Image: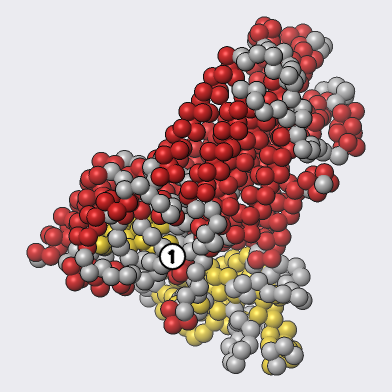
Amino acid sequence: MQKLIRNLMPLFAVLIAAMASAQGVSWQSKVEPLEGNAYRIVLEATVPSGYHMYDLGPYEGGGPNPTVITFTPGEGAVLDGEVEPLDPPHRYHDDVYGMEIGTYEGTVRFAQKVTLTAPQALVTAQLEWMICDDTSCMPPEDLELQIAVPEGAKVASAAGDQAEVAPAAETPATKDAAGKGSIWALIIEAILWGFAALLTPCVFPMVPMTVSYFLKGEGGAAMGRLRAALYGLFIVLLYTVPIAVIIIITRIVGGDAVTADIFNWLATHWLPNIIFFLVFMIFAASFFGAFEITMPSWMVNKTDSKADTKGLSGIFFLALTLVLVSFSCTGPIVGSVLIKSTSGEFWTPILTMLAFSVAFALPFTLFALFPSVLKKMPKSGGWLNSVKVVLGFVEVALGLKFLSVADQTYHWGILDREIYLAIWIVVFTLMGLYLLGKIKFAHDSDVPYLGVGRLALAIIVFAFVVYLIPGMWGAPLKGLSGYLPPLTSQDFVLGANTAAAPAASQSGIGKPKYSDFLHLPHGLEGFFDLKEAEAYAAKVRKPIFIDFTGHGCVNCREMEARVWSDPQVLDILRNDYVICALYADDKKELPEDEWITTDAGKVLKSLGKINSYYALKTYGVNAQPYYVLQGADGQPLVEPRGYDLDVAAFVQFLRSGVEAYHNADRQ
């Protein structure tokens, strides 16, 4: 069991690296001048080792997915001929497909001739490909490249020699949709986890011993402070650099598209979310004392022996020894910080780990600068194990979020809101009883009396439990909206019938498509298919409120709980708009007649992928929430809006859309 747990953290690195290598076809572009105004665009694809990519085909009658390259010239450019492969494929008769096919391995180049009718132009390349090894194939991938002709010309958002541009990066709207405050919340949470790690029994006793070692070393107190500062710096680097290296290598090898796919897969697919849930439960069991997650003893002993070396190397190995020795306490915390930050940008785990490690290393430097504070520190004792147990309860509560994401995305129906709340109420009640000394774990010391600190924490925990209880009858619990399943998943909501009465203003809405498994919050009525919403909006002569949302979108739930719940917002949404919620991560596979084919020829089958493709193609966004007020002509009435908890600004946003709709209607 311990050997399995020791390998959990490296497993995540291997998982990410394996996905990068499996999907990591990297694309580069360059522009070669020919005679006169003629140019040749050369695309170079690098296929990962062990895989092959199919040629341009085409294949009829159930053949493999060929590589598809579609060039779209911008103003001032004309295509000359078809796409031409510059490297011959390896052709052979495939027994599975029953036909001759062609494949590429290693590096392959494709060319397209272009003639300019203006000094410069922008050409867009839509790419789709599929790679296979000897046993299996990866799902088809697609990418868009923007290429400036001639090379280096400043045209629109062209990137020059390597013009690989993630579609979402072409417009600043993605940044707005992602949420202004979400990264700061993760940073603050990482800092709090860093300080919490200091109070664990593996780390806390090391603080005075380590600081005393530096102050008593050669060179006096000033040199000791310098060594302590370097010690803290090495701790930060040891926590931050490894994860940074893994992510950067993934980005370099796989490119922007692969990195984004990995993070999107980690955030919404059931497999990583179930794994993360189980990891949190294992971490919680470790904190409860069921076992310890430790690094191999040979590794700890080897680094500890080198810590006696003088100079910078000795300080480095002393820091490495601390990191390894404290792993049984900090490992679960580090894992929690990393897992929670995978839903952000590619650099988010690096930034959150930096925040965690700075908070973790800061006391070692501060106590060296102000050694007199050491005398005021509490002594080590049984209270340190109590900190671990409390963190274990927190791990159980937070781990449920990952199970909830998988449950909501795939409509399993196993963790509805009331079940989620019931588990939280039990977990935090047990935590409160533990703080009062009514529950005791294996490594706990006897508590002869109740201290003021434990009593204060118990009061806070039980107050939190009392706050949760009304949620069992449908209270919105706005402060936790980002963590809880949506209110629509709750079977019983007190007063739901009266709350839903105002929705009758949209009479004749009938039973919208997909409403058997998708719902709107706050008793609102609306649609989940844009064409259906447009038809109804034309009938009742109202603008459409398009809500690009997702089951796993924390910011979406927070907007619904804190902004949509405002009486002014609800009144405008009910009476002045036709609501259409488009879920970008729903895994429901639609009937074949509802599938769509992308510009690159890729067939999208699930509701989430179709909605996500529409958002990306139409508005250039792939993040939620994103709100669009659409007029009768199918165009936005005002500038779309992303995550922003300013209720007054949101009310003004809605009113400005209504005003713009009526102004257009009068013209």
- Measured from the top left, where is residue 457 in percent x and y? 55, 23
Q: Which residue is mark 1?
A: 517
Residue beneath the point at 38% across and 75% down? 117
- Position of 549 with respect to 661 (left or right) is right
- Measured from the top left, where is residue 116 in percent x and y? 41, 75
| Front-most of residues 179 and 401 | 401
Q: Does residue 41 show up? A: no
Q: Looking at numbered disc 1 in the image, what kind of residue is underneath it?
A: Phe
Q: How is the image coloured?
A: secondary structure
- Quick check: 148 above or below 473? below
- Position of 33 with respect to 665 (left or right) is right
- Quick check: 74 above or below 97? above
Residue beneath the point at 70% across and 62% down? 21
Q: How many marks?
A: 1
Q: Does residue 475 show up? A: yes
- Measured from the top left, where is residue 190 in percent x and y? 58, 35
Q: Quadrant of residue 414?
A: bottom right
Element class at badge 1: loop
The quadrant the C terminus occupies is bottom left
- Quick check: 279 above or below 272? above
For label 1, count other residues whose C-alpha is less than 10 Å away and answer few (under 14), some (14-19) or many (20+). few
| Front-most of residues 159 and 175 | 175
- Quick check: 644 above or below 267? above
- Position of 324 with respect to 72 (left or right) is right
Residue beneath the point at 89% across and 32% down? 301
| Front-most of residues 309 and 138 | 138
Residue beneath the point at 77% across and 13% down? 212
- Measured from the top left, where is residue 366 in percent x and y? 64, 17
